[in-house]
Amino acid sequence: MLTERQLFILRVLIDDYIKHVEPVGSRTISKREDITYSPATIRNELADLEDLGFLEKTHTSSGRIPSEKGYRFYVDHLLPSLSMKESEIGHSEFLFTEKVQEAEALFDQSAKILSDLTNYTSVVLGPNALDMKLKHMQIIPISSQVAVAIFVTNTGHVENRQIVLPDTIEPSELEKLVNILNERLAGVRLIELNTRIQKELSAVFKKHLKDYQNMGVFLDQLLLWSKKEKLFYGGKTNMLSQPEFRDLDKVRPLLDFLETRDLMEKLVSSTEKGLTIRIGTENEHEAMKNCSVINASYTMHGKHIGTISLIGPTRMEYQKVISLLDSLSKEMTNILNDFSN
Amino acid sequence: MLTERQLFILRVLIDDYIKHVEPVGSRTISKREDITYSPATIRNELADLEDLGFLEKTHTSSGRIPSEKGYRFYVDHLLPSLSMKESEIGHSEFLFTEKVQEAEALFDQSAKILSDLTNYTSVVLGPNALDMKLKHMQIIPISSQVAVAIFVTNTGHVENRQIVLPDTIEPSELEKLVNILNERLAGVRLIELNTRIQKELSAVFKKHLKDYQNMGVFLDQLLLWSKKEKLFYGGKTNMLSQPEFRDLDKVRPLLDFLETRDLMEKLVSSTEKGLTIRIGTENEHEAMKNCSVINASYTMHGKHIGTISLIGPTRMEYQKVISLLDSLSKEMTNILNDFSN
DNA sequence: ATTTAGCACTCGCTCTTTAAGAGTGCTAAC
DNA sequence: GTTAGCACTCTTAAAGAGCGAGTGCTAAAT
């Protein structure tokens, strides 16, 4: 267990390091008004904190910097509790340009606002369109062989894809098919359409459609979804202004990481409601080992549908950033839910 | 007028600089097998070429590097003529993963291929969907006030937007409107829909629609387009591996530029068919002053519909890159036109 | 009239050296 | 338990030396 004094010193040191990005020595700490001990005493405490793994040295006679464990402890135990902070700030107002009309604009602007406010990189993971419910679908022929299938969701989102029409199918049959789908499957989530058809509609199809056999392949083509979350970025190049990444060889992997959709999706996805903080190697990717990632989820009708995230150096201004992210995600949730009224 | 020897020396020097990215001195040039003159002679020529503005020195006693004017001359007069090069290479085969089905995939892959092959940054400017012709449109109500308008083009592209329904409009009227539009405006380019309506359809509307007065605003809302070209990137971070941008303060503006949609659109747009090369300040933007941009247009049914571009340092491997870009843009044109059969 | 050898001179780089400064750990005294 | 004092370590910046690549100019050679 850490003593009160150790906790205090640890917090002061990390605060200072976050602010100045330079190893902190005993003298610096002792100079603070609220510190009554001499540098020597503090040196002893620092040595202990280092033994415990909360601090590190960059070289034998340098000041200390927080270790990953140090940051983790700081975030978990030394941050002024969120609820307090929140009430202090009140509801922050974010500067959305005019009233945003479409969800995409909201996400895009949120990412931009967040990165502007923090000077870190931010990413919004949009909702998976496939989780939305079918409002209406349609198949529009482009040529004799190719058609466009369109799915409109209850949220007003439009999914579309080109499909190849089987030679055998007749226009009237196609129309029938579309009608059946619209009648029976309105309100079903896109992702579930295919299984629902197989479970419940084969009988109906057999009854109304001539060539049900060949339809199978066509339906599969029609309803084979690939993942469809969209990513919205803000401040992609902000990393370059972080002192710890002043070195090209250090930023390169980072920027490459940001450009790799798969990795980013994984990094930013989170099934949990609320706020998640991952520090350094907790992100489980080499390129992110000196970064922290904070994910905040936004919801619709109480259900988690996406996240807004901030990526910065492990030395992040956690306090500021957490309350920002917290209120912005709430604001997003509010606006989103206003849409559906 | 430059003498033969000057031309030769200029070309050798620029070739060498492009290859090694280091100021080239008289000794280096004289060591080449096909050079019979002594360093001293070459020094004299170099001094002349410098006076003429084709070369520069980084400091008083350094070797020479090409000036912007030098590159321009090199590209215009010293490059082995394209037609020759082409026949040498024959039709290069590009490695598109399986047969690309949709135009978007083609653009995306083209950009990736090009940046992989060159180690520069590439951008494809997609066709403006608004130049495509209306195949079919539809309005699908989401709630009592909001609807989604969908426009399918002859190329199978889908444009959609949310619109606010006027209180006054009746569902049957809406249906009539959509029918009229589909009957009368199929084949018209999206961008022209609005003017066509005003010129030709006001009579029809007056005849068939009850509340033609209020319809005006609604139509404007429905048909107010904003630019819709899409950009596809490849190798966004490749700039970081160019020796001339080894410096963070040099790359930062560049990367920022790449992230700014407006600027990129302008940079990469070109109305000309064929290949355009812009060197350094010819790009008319501070951030691009040390870059060259090569735009190649791809066409559909003989009409220029978009460009594929390469952005690299002014010291680019022009020869390689030009023939690459040339054949890739042709390949794109081919594949695109295959789509429409 | 070209071309070339020779030479003095200029920069930019790299390597050392030096000195200053910040910080530590340890010991001994308070 | 706390602190003053001190030797020691390591980083950083500045200054200087030496090298190498390159130039421009002059005078001799072709």
Image (cartoon, coloured by chain):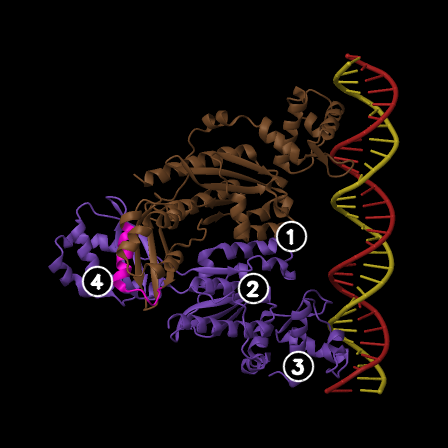
Chain colours: A purple, B brown, C yellow, D red
Query: Circle 3 sits on which residue?
Result: A8
Q: Which residue is mark 4?
A: A197
Q: CA distance from mark 2 to mark 4?
A: 44 Å
Tags 1 and 4 both on a single chain: no
Which label lies toward us, 3 or 1? Answer: 1
The chain carrying label 4 is A
Of A251 and B71, the residue lying toward us: B71
Element type at mark 2? helix
Which mark, residue A115? 2
| The quadrant where residue B298 appears | top left
Indicate which disc, 2 or 3, sits on the residue closer to the N terminus.
Answer: 3
Distance from disc 2 to disc 3, alpha carbons, whole Å, reads 31 Å
- Amino acid carrying label 2: it is Ser
**Disc 1 designates what residue?**
B248
Q: Is residue A98 left or right of residue A30?
A: left
Give percent across and percent down for residue C4: 77, 20
- The quarter of the picture where the C terminus of chain A appears is bottom left
Q: Which of marks 3 and 4 precedes in the sequence?
A: 3
Amino acid type assigned to the residue bearing label 4 in the image: Ile
Residue A212, given in percent of the width and then of the height, sits at 15, 55
Asked whether the viewer can see residue A46, the reply is yes
